[in-house]
Each structure stands twice: as structure tokens, then as C-alpha cells.
Image: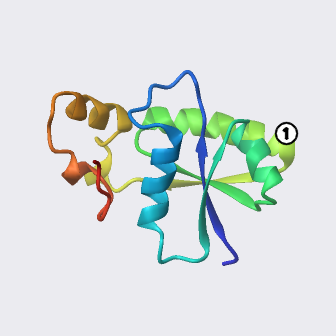
Amino acid sequence: MDEVIIGIGINDNKKTWFPMDKRLEMIRGLFADEPRIRVEAYDCLTVDFAKEQNAGFIVRGIRTVHDFEYEETIADINRKLAGIETILLFTEPELTSISSTIVRELLQFGKDVTPFLPEGMKID
């Protein structure tokens, strides 16, 4: 493995709980001991970001059938636009109910979201 780039897209149509600099800091903190993992923000199409980074492929996570149908369509478009393949990874069944929307809602009501976050991630 040369390098894994975790790209965080800037999407003004999506509501986020934390500003981008905080999101980058939290995710970089999770991978601080992994020299071959880089975390970057981007404000273009994912496929364009992948091309800019000379990525060989894009890896996406799938939780539901709906996710699969959407990602399958996007993967086809990415292949046609840039010749970049997409690898789809299926979530473990016990994690399929976790989403950023659910975590944001729990935070809004003051609930502890630790069980729904990657191990070692702290929200302050």
C-alpha cells in the first residue's frame, strides 16, 4: 500500500455539526500513528478529487440497499468520467443503523454518542 487518502467533501447542502477544520482534526487524530493515511478536505466532485490525488480507485462504504443503488450509479459515472473504479465495502450488520444524521440528533438532545463513534474519537 502506498497511501490511503480519506477525503472529506465540502457539501453546502449537508448539515454538519462541526466546522471542517474540527472534522479534519478529529479524523486526523484517529490516524495520527498511521503515516500512510492522509486526511484532506475537497470541494469538487469526489472523482475529480481522486484524479487530482492520482488515486487508483475510490473506496465507499455501504450500509443499506438504498446506499448500494446510489453508489452503484455513482461508480458507473465515475468510471465513465475518469476511468476510476469504485470498491464498495459492506458495513458489518451491527453497524448499519449508525449514521451521521442519527449521531447529530443524539448530540442535539445531549445524549452520549460514544458507542456510535470510532474507538478513540472524542467530541468536545
Answer with left or right where residue 61 lies relative to residue 87. left
Question: Crowdedness of circle 1 by 10 Å Cα count: few (<14), some, many (20+)?
Answer: few
Q: Residue furthest top?
A: 13
Judging by the rendered image, the residue that carries numbered circle 1 is 81
- Where residue 83 sits: x, y (%)? 84, 50
Q: Secondary structure at mark 1?
A: helix
- Where is residue 79, by image quadrant? top right
Q: Residue at x 73, y 36 (%)?
A: 44
Is residue 35 shown above or below 24?
below
Answer with left or right where residue 74 lies relative to residue 64. right
* Residue 90 visible, this orientation: no
- Where residue 100 sits: x, y (%)? 37, 37
- Where residue 65 sits: x, y (%)? 44, 37
What type is the residue that disc 1 sits on?
Answer: Leu
- Where residue 121 sits: x, y (%)? 32, 58
Q: Residue at x 60, y 35 (%)?
A: 10
Q: Residue at x 82, y 52 (%)?
A: 52
Answer with left or right where residue 1 lies relative to residue 118. right
Is residue 21 shown above or below 30?
above
